[in-house]
Image: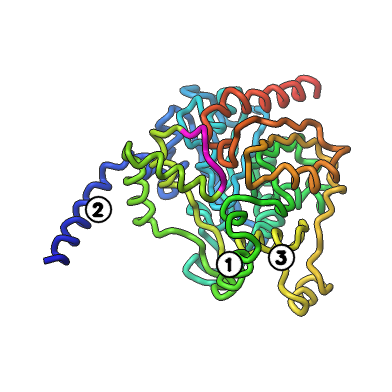
Amino acid sequence: MVINIFLILLFLLINETTAIDDECYLTVLSQCFFQPEIGKRFGYESEVHLVRTKDEYILELHRFPCKQKEKCDPSAKRPIVFMQHGLLADGFSWIPNLANQSAGFVFADAGFDVWIANSRGTPASQKHIGYGPENQKFWNFTWQEMSEFDLTSSVYYVLKETKQEFLYYLGHSQGTMIMFSRLAEDREFSKKIRHFHALAPVATVSHIGGLFGLFGKQFLTYAEILLGRLPYSPLSIPRTVQKMISYMCSKFLMQNICTLDIGFIDGSEKQFNQSRVGVYLCHTPAATSVKDLQHWIQLVKSQKVAKFDYGKDGNMAEYGQPEPPVYDLTQINTPTYLYWSGDDILADTQDIRDSILSKMNKTIAGSIELPHYSHMDFVFGINAASELYPVMISTNNTDIISF
């Protein structure tokens, strides 16, 4: 009897999930028929581009070349803005809200040619020439490979496709680390980045809060041991489960509870569009590798901006030295703009001062504190459209005029 009641309730719940906002079933762009989905819904011409990296991953880039409801010539030159998402996220991070509230659409309407990245492992970029995501080899990566292979291949592809010499880069969270590490090592690549806009920037994460801060360093030790038992595995939520969570969190009475759950990890989100929490959670968290999270835990413990630590013997085999190489941020010469907040418990202000401002002083073109922004508010917060994105657009436009 109990089993029958459970099955009936489960059937009703699954049946009810068909009532989820249909954006839950949309990707940034269609991965099957290369037709715009979310972009089309809001009236934007959209394109899907496939990029092959040097280590043979196939990535999707999503492009919005025109303003809303504009029939433009995609081959016409417009200033390029390249948007890179953070950890456990994908390109959806840049278009999570209504058109006038989402960075991807706001920049498109300001006349920019918008290109949105999807790093390896995310739903749009689970492809490889030799094997698929069902193979453990596929998940042998961290943000280190995203920086060395994904970022470089994608940026060079965009510039070749548009026949331009440089672009403007927006990175959020891990998306800033990906650029910091590449600029520190590759002077030739840095010439392609006109401005680097770092939202919720992270390099060292010694003073991280949230879940890590709550449980302390002992939690990191246990987590590292646990993750070490899952080498080369995906870190993801089954799609069906994610849709069910999305459905429950789309209900009015559950929305505040669901945002509290997100805040438990990275701070109290103050600026979410509560009516879209279900949509957020249908796309977030996005898949990555267990090894990527391991790398971040290593950084918290080491207090360095270093490559992945394989242990003494592994490091000798991988790097030719017993310790993992450390990225030297003093080598960066690209004009960089930092956007941060004292309320962001993941991109802590002390870490920003110690690892970014102190080492990149000569290239920090702007450092702007935004009060009461939590980590995800920089991309999901509705206030960012009036307080943050116009600042970046104005900065870029001033540079374009003077160039």
Which amino acid, by three-letter code, is at mark 2?
Ile
Disc number for residue 308: 3
Helix, strand or loop for disc 1: helix
Kindly identify which numbered label has been placed on residue 14. 2
Name the amino acid type tagged 1.
Ala
Residue segment shown in magenta: 266-272
Label the magenta part by its dominant secondary structure. Answer: loop
Mark 1 Cα-neighbour bin, 10 Å: few <14, some 14–19, many ≥20: some
On the question of residue 163 being in view, the answer is no
225 displayed left or right of 97: right
Tell me where residue 394 appears, x and y as whole percent: 69, 22
336 versus 175 height, above or below: above
- What is the CA distance from the residue labelled 3 to the residue labelled 2? 41 Å
Picture residue at 43% right of the left edge, 36% below the top? 38
* Residue 202: x %, y % from top left: 70, 47
Residue 22 lies in what quarter of the image?
A: top left
Asked whether disc 2 touches disc 1, contact meaning CB atoms under 8 Å apart, the reply is no
Return the disc, 2 or 1, that comes first in the chain's sequence: 2
- N-terminal-most mark, 3 or 2: 2
Residue at screen point 76% across, 51% down: 182
Which quadrant holds the N terminus? Answer: bottom left
Give how far apart the Cα atoms at labels 2 and 1 are.
33 Å
Q: Image height check: is 331 above or below 194? A: below
Disc 3 crowd, CA 10 A, few/some/many (<14, 14-19, 20+) = many
Quadrant where the C terminus sits is top right
Residue for point 60% across, 73% down: 225
Q: Amino acid at mark 3?
A: Phe
The image's mark for residue 223 is: 1
**Magenta stretch: residue 37 in it?**
no
Bin the neighbour count of mark 2 within 10 Å (Cα to Cα): few under 14, some 14-19, many 20 and up: some
Q: Is residue 108 left or right of residue 217?
A: left
